Image (spheres, rainbow, N blue to C red):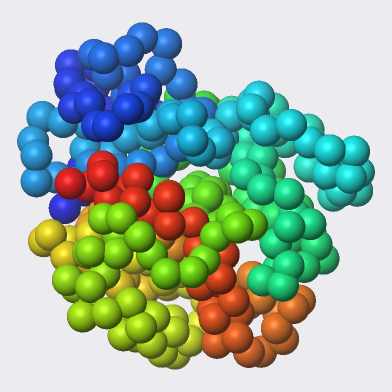
Amino acid sequence: MLDLVSSASRTCRPYVHICMTSIFGTCNMQKNVTRNNIPHFSINGLKNTCKLSYIKISSFPSPLTKNSNRRFSKSDESLYEDWDVQSLWTSKPFSLMKLPFNPQDMTPFLSQEAIKYHYGRHHAAYVRNLNNLAEQHNELRKETLGEIIEKYEGPIYNNAAQIFNHNFFWLGIKADGGGKPYGVVKDKIEESFISFENFREIFLKEASAHFGSGWTWLIMKDEKLKLYHGHDADNPIKSKVGHPILTIDIWEHAYYVDYKNSRSDYIKEWFNKVNWDFANYNLSIAN
């Protein structure tokens, strides 16, 4: 079961080569903790650790950072200007993450038009909505995304969870991704699903069959990888079902521009862009 870090008195356990920070409370390892870091998690099997923390590492962009390390080309800049999202990169109290890839490099999985609506309209709208809600509920200004997801229901929870879910989704894909998994995630997939081919078949079948909108998550639970299908904005933080490794957005807005009603084709192409580095890193945190 996942738990949240809520106090500076909790200590953090260092994992691999990382700079540990937490949006769920400060940690003894580092001062000046901010909300603007990548979501990674340690599972509640090791008590007195940062059980659900945001970790900033050099190999991944920060999902909510105000100043991304990724430099944009002129073509990138024109896209973002057209999408009218740049002001949200520095909005407060919650901001829109910069995409960790060039939108033009995501074809054939996602066209620029699809990303425009998915990121520039839907994801951006969740950020705007949550900031508007924070104006009505001042206590939200002091809350982190993780705290909101755990504590709130209704529109406040839905918008916070959708921001987090989309951040995780974008970080889980990359232009030169896909192919067969490698490293620890390869071993865990074979241990949990017999083979990658079997895992892919099960993932495709279950995610395609999920009724209505939601997210399919690859999670670590009881030392094995499992699939979790969350309805609407549901995620493993809220449901406390395991440790998130990867996710795919199966709301219609994620695929309808490019795939119309063929969710299965969208999922097949997602496998050609999966960021196995991100999955391996999340597994290193889980372990």
- Give the side of residue 131 with respect to residue 249, left or right: right
How many marks do you count on the picture? 0
The quarter of the picture where residue 245 lies is: bottom left
Find residue 18 and report its horizontal and vertical position in percent.
35, 27
Find residue 125 and report its horizontal and vertical position in percent.
69, 51
Q: Could you tell me which residue is drawn at 24 percent across and 32 percent down?
A: 15
Q: Could you tell me which residue is drawn at 66 percent across and 40 percent down?
A: 98
- Give the side of residue 171 with respect to residue 278, left or right: right
Find residue 219 and report its horizontal and vertical position in percent.
28, 62
Whether residue 131 is situated above or below residue 106 in the rendered picture: above
Q: Could you tell me which residue is drawn at 38 percent across and 32 percent down?
A: 55
Whether residue 73 is situated above or below residue 283 in the rendered picture: above
Looking at this view, is 99 or 151 the one in front?
99
Whether residue 191 is situated above or below residue 19 in the rendered picture: below
Looking at this view, is 26 or 274 the one in front?
274
Is residue 121 visible in the rendered image? The answer is no
Residue extending furthest top? 31
- Give the side of residue 55 with respect to residue 63, left or right: left
- Give the side of residue 222 with respect to residue 270, left or right: left
Is residue 170 visible in the rendered image? The answer is yes
The quarter of the picture where residue 39 lies is: top left
Find residue 153 and report its horizontal and vertical position in percent.
41, 53
Whether residue 182 is situated above or below residue 14 in the rendered picture: below
